Amino acid sequence: MTESRIDSTHDVSLQSWVASANAAETDFPIQNLPFGMFRKAGSDEAFRPGTAIGDQIVDLLALVEAGLLTGDAAAALQGTDTGSLNPLMARGRPARVALRVALSEGLRAGSTKQAGWQAALLPQAQAEYAMPARVGDYTDFYAGIHHATTVGKLFRPDNPLLPNYKWVPIGYHGRASSLRTTGLQFHRPKGQTKGPDDAAPRMQPSQRLDYELELGVFVGQSNEMGEPVSIHDAEEHLFGLTLLNDWSARDIQAWEYQPLGPFLSKSFASTLSPWVVTLEAMEPFRMPFTRPEGDPQPLPYLDSEEVRARGALNLELEVWLQTERMRAEGQPHQRLMRSNFKDTYWTMSQLLAHHTVNGCNLQPGDLMGSGTLSGEDPSQGGSLLELSMGGKNPLVLANGEKRTFLQDGDSVMLRGRSSREGFRSIGFGECEGRVLPARA
């Protein structure tokens, strides 16, 4: 089906009785309504499902417990009191839409529910977050063609893209246990590295620690083992999007990745933003998906009228860096780059259809990473590996510091935002992590 799913919840004129949701710069106007797991900071309370609205969080279970959220919307949240959104994800699009519509109606200006719902608000500044879902499996794809081309040129100047790249979505099985939400502080990883002139490898802290700007895609409804999901049904099995920083130890990766791919260079940490923006919230930012002239069209199991008509997303992405010195001197993060998810070589539905074509069974809460999302221009590299050309061209920051790869104390923040004339812009909040020194 190719019809738009834009409805009254996307109306640009909608305002909320939560005043901060009406500010032009907010990531969370009433047209967004993302989901996450939160609790009051410093408490030992269980994490609960919430919705971001302006600078506030709506405690969804508090509404249900008070009888202020009922019917299909309340039923959609059953089971989420165990600390994850997996039960909501598993129920599919109808449950998600029922909850979204109820929240939109209850939070809009003039709603008769305002008096009762106000007691269910908590300022985001007073909250801490858990992972939105229990991630059973995590697959990292390589769908950013500009990243693949730039990195390929560093190692294969005459043949940057391998022959299969334009035919098959490349991916590898990642480590789900080391996924964490924003605010993660992790120690610099150790591993085997070997320089070109070294007689033997050595065990040491990574000297080429990097970030990767990615988009995470959460699976909603599952499929049975042995039953592939058709490209026509793939989006019915997707729940929503999150920012993803796939931290990478490039020197460890260079020594270990042949012949089976990344292992310890990727499994030490990955950071997600706490809020999951649903596919419904992203509906106004759909775009036609096209391939460059001369490139092969996807095989039939990855191709459909809907993919071509609306498979791409206009989602602007940014990476910001704050060094330890900048932090000490009270200087804010500095933006390093900007790119757009619309340039990805494979769509979300294509990734899921390919993942299941062999009969692989996906579960609610499983995560797919897009791969590094770089732009065509060299200034749009989604990693320091690209921006510094493999460490050959250091970046000079505004305060005079230089970076080829990350140093201890560096904090990396990802941002994402979608805009379109005639609609409210929406965002993802912040996805931030900080590098600590390697353990002794």
Image (cartoon, rainbow, N blue to C red):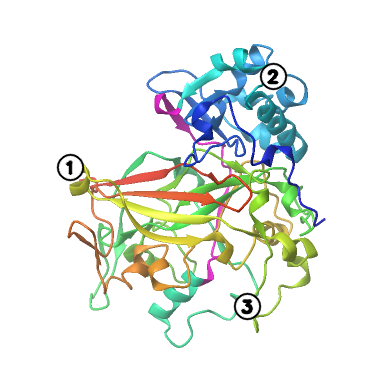
Magenta-drawn segment: 124-145
Mark closest to the chain's N terminus, 2 or 3: 2
Q: Are marks 1 and 2 in contact (CB under 8 Å)?
A: no
Label 3: how many Cα within 10 Å (few below 14, some 14–19, many 20+): few
Residue under label 3: 292
Magenta segment: does it hold 137?
yes
Q: Quadrant of residue 369?
A: bottom right
Question: Where residue 352 sits: x, y (%)?
Answer: 68, 56
Amino acid type of the residue that numbered disc 2 sits on in the rendered structure: Leu
Observer able to see residue 27: yes
Q: Is residue 166 left or right of residue 409?
A: right
Residue under label 2: 69
Q: Quadrant of residue 398?
A: bottom left
Question: Where residue 402 sits: x, y (%)?
Answer: 21, 62
Q: Is residue 302 above or below residue 48?
A: below
Q: Residue at x 66, y 28 (%)?
A: 103
Q: Secondary structure at mark 1?
A: helix
Residue under label 1: 328
Pick whichever, 419 or 307, lies toward us. 419
Magenta segment: does it hold 157?
no
Pick whichever, 372 or 29, lies toward us. 29
Q: Is residue 40 above or below residue 55?
A: above
Question: Where residue 83 sits: x, y (%)?
Answer: 56, 27
